[in-house]
Image (tube, grey):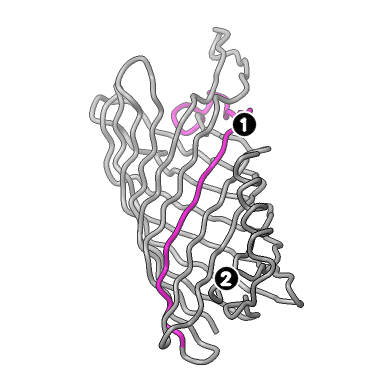
């Protein structure tokens, strides 16, 4: 993360002496996304895998005061994934994801009319895995899970100047997990089983996108690919007695890739 922030600072210092022509603007933006979702838990045996397609939407508002830029954005997505592990396979598991993020940054003028906007932010991400009431191909019962991330963000947006009604936006972001937990509703499989709420120890995420913008006055339509990645450390352990045996539970280390296409409308 230190190298990432140093690179942003160096770009900011380099661009400060040049005039800007692609400054951030106040306004609303609406977005739609479609992406492939891939979750992995690497274990000694076969990895735990979730793979599927999710559809989502987002709404955000940007406010600009001089060179300072603030943005609040909320997003939601839903779809289904196919699960596989050494306990069998389970298809069509419903997944719902929500995210809320607040960022504050500053426009920095770059050579050639581009604008670099480094920013810092705070965010929260919530995922629901609805495996409860389902049974795998080998007879194992599924249970619902709620996974929450609380993170700090550091990122940038690079906007090129308008050329004949078109411009480009490139973004990158680093997320550092500082809180959150994984709650497993084991009572879905047995009313006497404990529901587990395991706190995360840490982890990080990365995000990147490349968009082409079609500009018409104060309106802008954008489309392009994006990628998101999460790498989460093993959780803290919790000890329960069930039914008469003492068991230690831990959420394993895991990773998630989200690769897709986004289109948005700013006004």
Q: Position of residue 18 (x, y in %)?
A: 64, 72
Q: Is residue 12 above or below residue 216?
A: above
Magenta stretch encompasses residue 136 = no
Q: CA distance from mark 2 to mark 1?
A: 38 Å
Q: Position of residue 115 (x, y in %)?
A: 59, 70
Q: Position of residue 155 (x, y in %)?
A: 60, 54
Instruction: Determine whether, in the image, residue 154 is placed left or right of residue 165.
Output: right
- Give the class, few, some or many, for how many residues have Cα within 10 Å of label 1's Cα (few <14, many ≥20): many
Q: Residue at x 51, y 67 (%)?
A: 58
Q: Which residue is mark 1?
A: 202
Instruction: Determine whether, in the image, residue 234 is placed left or right of residue 104.
Output: left
Q: Which residue is mark 2?
A: 111
Magenta stretch encompasses residue 202 = yes
Q: Residue at x 76, y 77 (%)?
A: 66
Q: Which quarter shows the N terminus?
A: top right
Q: Magenta segment, which residues?
A: 187-215
Label number found at residue 232: none
Nearest to viewer (mark 2 / mark 1): 2
């Amino acid at each position: 993360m230190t190298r990432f922030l140093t690179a942003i600072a160096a770009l900011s210092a380099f661009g400060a002496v040049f005039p800007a022509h692609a400054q951030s603007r106040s306004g609303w933006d609406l977005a739609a996304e479609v992406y492939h979702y891939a979750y992995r838990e690497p274990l000694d045996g076969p990895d735990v895998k979730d793979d599927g397609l999710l559809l989502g939407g987002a709404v955000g508002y940007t406010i600009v005061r001089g060179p300072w830029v603030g943005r609040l954005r909320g997003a939601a997505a839903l779809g289904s994934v196919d699960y596989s592990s050494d306990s069998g396979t389970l298809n069509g598991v419903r997944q719902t994801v929500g995210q809320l993020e607040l960022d504050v940054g500053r426009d920095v003028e770059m050579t050639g009319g581009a604008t670099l906007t480094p920013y810092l932010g705070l965010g929260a991400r919530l995922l629901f895995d609805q495996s409860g009431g389902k049974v795998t191909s080998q007879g194992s019962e599924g249970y619902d899970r709620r996974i929450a991330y609380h993170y700090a963000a550091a990122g940038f947006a690079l906007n090129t100047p308008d050329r004949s009604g078109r411009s480009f936006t490139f973004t990158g972001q680093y997320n550092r997990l500082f809180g959150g937990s994984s709650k497993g509703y084991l009572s879905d499989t047995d009313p006497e089983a404990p529901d587990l709420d395991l706190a995360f120890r840490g982890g990080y995420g990365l995000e990147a996108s490349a968009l082409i913008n079609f500009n018409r006055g104060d309106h802008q339509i954008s489309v392009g690919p994006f990628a998101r990645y999460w790498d989460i450390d093993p959780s803290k352990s919790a000890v329960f007695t069930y039914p008469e045996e003492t068991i230690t539970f831990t959420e394993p280390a895991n990773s998630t890739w989200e690769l897709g296409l986004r289109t948005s409308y700013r006004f």
